[in-house]
Image: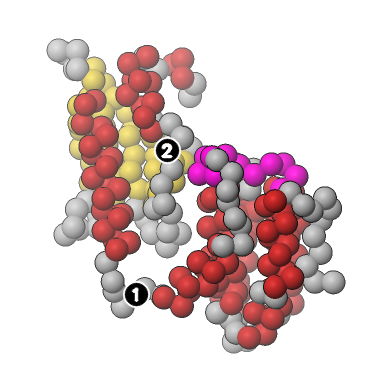
Amino acid sequence: MTKKKLPLSVLKALEPFVGMQGNLFTIEEPGNNLLYAKDKDPSSDFYFVIEKYEISSDGREIYYIGHSPKDEKEVKATAFRVLRDDLRATFNSWILSLENYDKIKSFYDDPILESYEEEFFANFELVEEGADTRPFKTTQILQLDYLLEQVSTRLIEMVDENNREEIKSIITEITEVRENLPTRPQKWIAEHVSKIYAKIAKQGIKFMKEFWAEGKKEIIKNIVKGLIEHGPDMFN
């Protein structure tokens, strides 16, 4: 769909969502919808979608909404219609649900993994304005792709009967990040690479030594700063 297939009034209603990013959600390609947002947590099925619009007999714009969770009592999806003026409030209510999930303490949290994520995320030093919306430069993308390719290759070499499923899951996540390098903003990449390295660290000391050595973490910093001109070889 192109914007000139939609009425200008609809585009104005959707404009506040353009480029919107948050700590807990991402705005995705809408496909056949007008808007599609989803929870950043890869294990979550929560989403918010504006499916379509219609003009009522009295000239009002009505938008078809779907989201999950439905409310505090049910995680299943719900669908309904709202007037144009209620779009933003409805979306903010969904964001509030994500925030409440993020704040609440539970037995399902993994504080060790979260600690590793935060530690590794510091290596990115995202100081450029627009890190929430702008991708890395093409040279940085190629360098990150090369780095992740090497990480994936080395992980395969370190598979044993005890870690096979965990390593398989990590490699799947690496593949997803590599596929998204050209189209995702810097912060999304940084967060997902940090999650990958956190899961690697949880595999044990051998993995920490292989992937978390200070010199190897410096490679990430140098890529982000644009200080590496050629493909970084992490394992020489």
Report the span colored magenta.
Answer: 130-140
User: What secondary structure is marked by label 2?
Assistant: loop
Locate residue 121, reporting x and y percent: 55, 62
Q: Is residue 164 above or below residue 132?
A: below
Residue at horizontal 45%, vertical 59%?
A: 42
Examine the rendered structure and indicate whether residue 155 appears above or below residue 58.
below
Query: In which quadrant is the C terminus drawn?
Result: bottom right
Query: Is 47 contained in the magenta span?
Result: no
Q: Position of residue 140 (x, y in %)?
A: 71, 48
Residue 60 found in image quarter: top left
Residue type at mark 2: give it. Answer: Met
Task: Say which residue label 1 marks.
Answer: 108
* Dominant SS in magenta: loop
In this rendering, does residue 151 appear at all? no
Q: Which residue is at 73% across, 49% downward? A: 226
Amino acid type of the residue tagged 1 in the rendering? Tyr
> Which residue was labeled with disc 2?
20
Q: Tell me: residue 16, above or below residue 56.
A: below
Q: Residue at x 24, y 17 (%)?
A: 55
Residue 182 in which image quadrant: top right
- Seen at 54% across and 40% down, the residue is 130
Where residue 136 appears, x then y in whole percent?
Answer: 64, 44
